[in-house]
Image: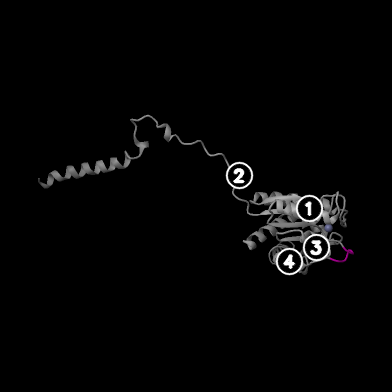
Amino acid sequence: MGPGSKEPRALLEDILAANKEVLDTSNPSHLDNTLPDPDATPAPPAKVTSPEKPKLKVGLFVGHNKGTGAVAIDGADEWESRNKVALAASEKLTDAGYEVHVIYRDGSVGYSAAMRAHGERSRADKLDVAIELHFNAYDGQAHGAEMIVATHKSANTLGKAFQEATEEFYPNRTLRDGGVKLKTSGRGHLFNANQRCPSGIYEPCFGDAEEWLEYAGDVDKEASYLANIVERFHEGAG
Ligand SMILES: [Zn+2]
């Protein structure tokens, strides 16, 4: 054959190759001469399942019982104010992918039994971190922020998160003892003693001192601060 007859053949091959690409008969969707295959009908969309695993399971324990606890300089009640912050922080953390449990004391039993119940609740909910919310009160003169922990592990994770978040959100606050107090007896210890996960007593300020007003006037800010403590703990604890 002469060279001239090769060109139409090459052109035909090009067209066939192009058609093959478009009309890919190995792909059933490109066949138009068959009835729909019922077996190929796509399955209905999967039931929407719960969002992926929570980043952490967080327990926010409101300190004291309703109507008890300290009273701030503006008359604010410790339980009421801590409850507001716990609920607002819970909303923020839930939005950020955490599973949050706001937990109250059983007011019908004594302190020790209530703390044991908190520990049981914490294990039942498989909490990764447990924080009991308070504000401090002493003689109207004392001031500053601290988190009371019972183990070095809690100090180095949750305590560190508390320290860093306080520096960011309330830079004027004095960090009492560097912001983290390791205590294996006395005030607040039974809360920590009953927890198996990192835990701490959150005392961001003294309610009976002027510094309280910075918290009283802005629940949303304190809630963001508390949420930030949890986020820092999460990042640090990996
Ligand atoms: Zn308290």
> Mark 1 = which residue?
117
Q: In which quarter of the image is ligand 1?
A: bottom right
Q: Position of residue 129 (x, y in %)?
A: 70, 57
Residue placed furthest toward the right: 139
As drawn, the label of residue 151 is 4
Left or right: where 105 falls relative to 3: right
Kind of residue indicated by mark 1:
Ala
Which residue corresponds to the image point at 77% horizontal and 67% vertical from the top-left?
A: 181
> Mark 2 = which residue?
50
Ligand 1 within 8 Å of disc 2? The answer is: no
The vertical placement of 41 against 5, above or below, is above
Q: Where is residue 14 in the image (x, y as percent from the top left)?
A: 24, 44
Name the dominant secondary structure of the magenta segment. Answer: loop
Q: What element carries label 4?
A: loop
Would you say residue 220 is visible in this rendering? Answer: no
User: Badges 1 and 3: C-beta atoms under 8 Å apart?
Assistant: no
Mark 4: few/some/many CA within 10 Å (<14, 14-19, 20+): some
Q: How are the colours assigned in the image?
A: one colour
User: Label 3, label 2: how many angstroms apart (C-alpha)?
Assistant: 36 Å
Left or right: where 139 falls relative to 42: right
> Mark 3 = which residue?
189
Highlighted magenta segment, given as a residue range: 138-142
Kind of residue indicated by mark 4:
Thr
User: Badges 4 and 1: C-beta atoms under 8 Å apart?
Assistant: no
Q: Earlier in the sequence, mark 4 or mark 1?
A: 1
Q: Position of residue 147 (x, y in %)?
A: 76, 63
User: Label 2, label 4: how many angstroms apart (C-alpha)?
Assistant: 34 Å
User: Label 3, label 4: how many angstroms apart (C-alpha)?
Assistant: 11 Å
Would you say residue 230 is visible in this rendering? Answer: yes
